[in-house]
Image: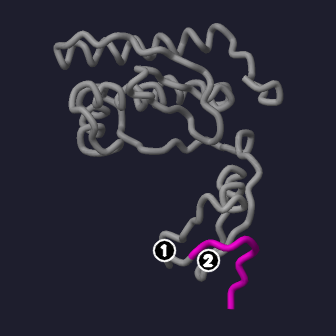
């Protein structure tokens, strides 16, 4: 990890709670699906505003340590099964849409957790600097990474609503 990227130290009790949750939901899946899934690796290196991500080929769940510290119970109840469901769906059905019917079924019917695609956590503590961009219809905020790609001429971004190319600067309503 780069020296300027500060990862908080996670108390062992929090890591143990996450592991208990993972093992609980994995056991549920093993019983209901009558299979024996290996325990995925847990890595506390997710950055940015994502609570977690599932790395399918690595059979790994990455957890955002900052958001975990700020939302401990929600991680145990929602984020761990959400990411585990992605791994289980991949092993069971292969490549399918990430939050499609298979994932929804895995969450609700197998793991017994409401199938929500995104978390509702406060993200001020993990939000990085953004840069104002505009299209024909609204203001946009691009991440540092996307802004730099625009500056280097590697990428361009369009508004999903009006389809116009995003331009640096503030949106001025007419």
- Main secondary structure found in the magenta portion: loop
Q: Which residues are magenta?
A: 165-174
Query: Observer-nearest residue: 24 or 62?
Result: 62
Task: State left or right for residue 13 relative to residue 31.
Answer: right
Picture quadrant of residue 88: top left
Q: Quadrant of the C terminus?
A: bottom right
Q: Secondary structure at mark 1?
A: loop
Q: Is residue 146 above or below residue 64?
A: below
Q: Residue at x 48, y 23 (%)?
A: 61
Q: Is residue 171 magenta?
A: yes
Q: Which mark sits nearer the N-terminus, 2 or 1?
A: 2
Question: How far across and how far down the image is residue 43, in percent?
Answer: 56, 19
Residues at badges 2 and 1 in contact (C-beta under 8 Å)? yes
The crowd level at tag 1 (other Cα within 10 Å; few <14, some 14-19, many 20+) is few
The residue labelled by disc 2 is 135
Q: Secondary structure at mark 2?
A: loop
The crowd level at tag 2 (other Cα within 10 Å; few <14, some 14-19, many 20+) is many
The residue labelled by disc 1 is 161
Q: Residue at x 20, y 18 (%)?
A: 32
| Residue at far right of view | 4
Task: State left or right for residue 7 relative to residue 108.
Answer: right
Question: How far across and how far down the image is residue 83, in percent?
Answer: 43, 29
| Residue at far left of view | 34
Question: How far across and how far down the image is residue 80, in percent?
Answer: 46, 25
Picture quadrant of residue 147: bottom right
| Residue at far front of view | 153
Q: Quadrant of the N terminus?
A: top right
Q: Residue at x 24, y 10 (%)?
A: 36
Q: Is residue 133 above or below residue 101?
A: below
Q: Is residue 133 above or below residue 52?
A: below
Picture quadrant of residue 25: top left
């Amino acid at each position: 990890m780069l020296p300027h990227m500060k990862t908080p130290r996670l108390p062992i009790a929090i890591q143990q709670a996450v592991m208990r949750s993972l093992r609980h939901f994995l056991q549920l899946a093993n019983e209901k699906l009558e299979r024996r899934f290996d325990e995925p690796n847990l890595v506390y290196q997710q950055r940015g505003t994502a609570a977690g991500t599932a790395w399918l080929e690595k059979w790994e769940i990455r957890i955002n340590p900052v958001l975990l510290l700020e939302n401990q119970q929600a991680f145990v109840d929602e984020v761990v099964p959400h990411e585990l469901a992605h791994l289980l769906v991949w092993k069971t059905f292969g490549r399918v849409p990430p939050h499609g019917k298979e994932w929804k079924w895995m969450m609700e019917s197998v793991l017994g957790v409401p199938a929500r695609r995104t978390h509702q956590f406060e993200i001020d503590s993990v939000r990085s600097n953004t840069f104002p961009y505009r299209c024909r219809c609204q203001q946009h905020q691009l991440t540092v990474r996307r802004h730099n790609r625009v500056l280097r001429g590697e990428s361009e971004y369009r508004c999903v609503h009006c389809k116009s190319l995003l331009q640096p600067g503030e949106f001025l309503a007419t």
